[in-house]
Amino acid sequence: MAATAREDGASGRERGQRGCEHYDRGCLLKAQQTCEECSTLFGEYYCDICHLFDKDKKQYHCENCGICRIGPKEDFFHCLKCNLCLAMNLQGRHKCIENVSRQNCPICLEDIHTSRVVAHVLPCGHLLHRTCYEEMLKEGYRCPLCMHSALDMTRYWRQLDDEVAQTPMPSEYQNMTVDILCNDCNGRSTVQFHILGMKCKICESYNTAQAGGRRISQDQQ
């Protein structure tokens, strides 16, 4: 075995130098950031737990996550319930779902916990890759898992109020009501049917779905 290791090392030198002159391929090496003989630096960042070598990207090792993450460390905190490192501006300001980071991103279906892409926490508590979240907003505004609004829509709802007020329905629909379910507050209410949207009476969101058939209001017949 020793002869084979030496032969592998010699052929490695013939193919081209890798590492420093003290590196002999095939030998059992102790993982470390620098060569003990000449102090050659193998990686600007080295984790002696993950044995990860990399360029300096302000990485840090999170014991709770069990992996190295791109920092800087002071910009992140570890949420024990979500089981993930999140940006400091979310500390105490996000909805926790236990072990939510162990689920795949519902957009790309790739792992979130070990991804180098920053996770974005939706108001409902579900996670998406930041890049997937930005792409999702080009097509819609709802969480793909629970249909809750993925961002503050208050300003848009007020604009929709104006549009509904300026767009009267035809006479045959003016007295028509419908039961709706709100995706934001999960409340149910009966409202006047309108083609542009039906507003929740509880939270005033237009993120609603029809939950019953249309009918003509009895007191208007």
Image (cartoon, helix red, strand yellow):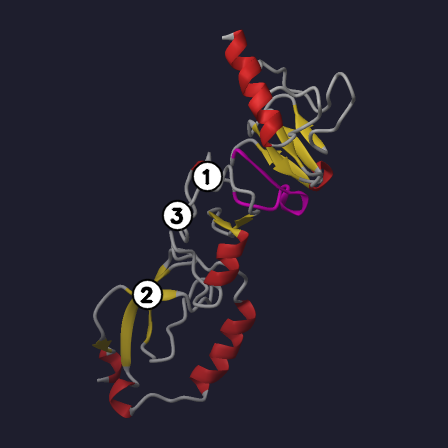
Q: Quadrant of residue 166?
A: bottom left
Q: x and y percent of residue 178 in the render?
A: 28, 72
The image quadrant where one finds the C terminus is bottom left
Comparing labels 3 and 1, the label whose residue is closer to the camera: 3
Q: Which residues are magenta?
A: 83-95
Type of amino acid at the residue the image marks with label 1? Val
Q: Mark 3 or mark 2: name the one nearer the start of the chain.
A: 3
Q: Secondary structure at mark 1?
A: helix
Q: Nearer the viewer, residue 106 or 197?
A: 106
Residue 63 can be seen, yes or no: no
Q: Nearer the viewer, residue 27 or 7?
A: 7
Query: Mark 3 = which residue?
Result: 109
Residue 90 part of the magenta-drawn span: yes
Q: Earlier in the sequence, mark 2 or mark 1?
A: 1
Circle on res. 18: none
The answer to whether residue 140 is above or below residue 52 is below
